Amino acid sequence: MIDSSILQGKKAAYFTLGCKLNFAETSTVAQQLEHYGVRKVAKGEVADLVVVNTCSVTEVADHKCRQAIHRLVKAHPGAFVVVTGCYAQLKPQEIIDTEGVDLVLGTEQKGNIVPAILEGMTQAVQPLQSFPTHPFFPACSRGDRTRYFLKVQDGCNYFCTYCTIPIARGRSRNGSIASLVEQAEQVVREGGKEIVITGVNIGDFGRSTGETFFELVQALDKVEGIERYRISSIEPNLLTDEIIDFCAQSRTFMPHFHIPLQSGCDEVLKLMHRKYDTAQFSHKIEKIRQAMPDAFIGVDVIVGTRGETEEYFQAAYDFMERVDVSQYHVFSYSERPGTKALDIPHVVTPQEKHERSQRVLALSAQKTREFYHRFVNNTRPVLLEHASPRKPFMNGFTDNYIRVEVPNQPELDNQIVQVKLGGLNQKGDAVMGVRV
């Protein structure tokens, strides 16, 4: 057995790229290491241990990961450097060849990171490990935010033509409802009020346990002490009418949805191998609007995919313009080795991708402004966070996910207060509010 006391008193630096799921997992890794006496490095200190949790959703993400690894190796000379996550899963040899990296772990080895680090620090091990992707690694953590992130599911069985996630994270699997309720109850004991439900394809919850996402939502709603849940992202074909109706009447589930569309053109959706069409997507938006007229609806879209002709993009844009959503999260398509999208003819040029991205971003900004303006002079509950004595304002979100700035009162951090909403701030990314 390896002596874990070698970790006592060590200082660790953590760096995360990518999705909310990654941030939740990094925070859980930090908690595990803290149990062994490892503290987070202070500003200006040199770390003994560096943990980099990577993303590989696009080639740009890969590039950012490489940059981050080089920067952290340089900033913390002599540190034991561990790289994990999706980039490590998909392209381990690239990382192994990077000077200063000591250990490369796949996505699911995050759950065994402490034994792997101990072995790596005490023995001459190869930096490349085997990468099983079957276990479910639980994660529920706050990190540096007021909101908690509860990982309920991992992996994906969908194999969309543009996506490497099933390769990077494996097949769909999940924790049990009972275990997830226990984690939510622990959040209550720590003083948390809001939980964001995260995963790769959370609507597919239940593959491991024979349960359903709707049953999970019902169970979490009963946890006393949690005042807010948000569903981070759910496929439109898995967002059932019964889930929408339940959330509309729920004590804790907020009027806020994040739904991937990816393209507003049916021909492109077929090329992507998505499991819905624009008619089904429209039905879900209409259903939400009927049940929760004030709901914030964020939507993911990809521009410039292979096969997206100018005609197809215009059809997608026209659909996005019509549909009643609050914001678009825009991604430019990136070629990923090993994906079936590479077999699709018609390649969109980088300039065309940029122009299309800018058009959709402008549309998104317009829709978000219109959504925010609907609630001027309304009073809504806001969970305040990020109070700093040096700043004149503190931030928070309404129940329906409007970002709000109010005069700074640090004692209100992690408190839900009633706020009267005003107009946009100077940056245009939040509304000004006054506590009532």
Image (cartoon, rainbow, N blue to C red):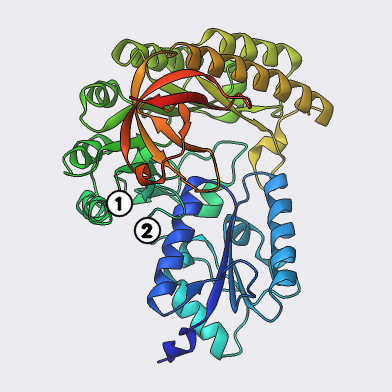
Which mark is on residue 402?
Answer: none
How far apart marks 2 and 1 lie (CA) works out to 9 Å
The structure residue drawn at horizontal position 67% and vertical position 18%, both measured from the top left corner, is 362
In the rendering, at what x and y percent does residue 411 appear? 36, 46
The structure residue drawn at horizontal position 30% and vertical position 49%, both measured from the top left corner, is 192
The structure residue drawn at horizontal position 16% and vertical position 40%, both measured from the top left corner, is 222
Which mark is on residue 208?
Answer: 1
Q: Nearer the viewer, mark 2 or mark 1?
A: 2
Q: Amino acid at mark 2?
A: Phe
In the rendering, at what x and y percent does residue 108 appear? 46, 62
In the image, 390 versus 238, the foreground residue is 390
Q: Quadrant of residue 58?
A: top right
In the rendering, at what x and y percent does residue 217 appear? 25, 37
Q: Count of labels shown?
A: 2
- Circles 2 and 1, Cβ within 8 Å, touching? The answer is yes
Q: Quadrant of residue 44?
A: bottom right
Name the N-terminal-most of marks 2 and 1: 2
Residue linked to disc 2: 136
Work out whether residue 82 can be spotted: yes
Q: Is disc 1 placed on a helix, strand or loop?
A: loop
Q: Is disc 2 placed on a helix, strand or loop?
A: loop
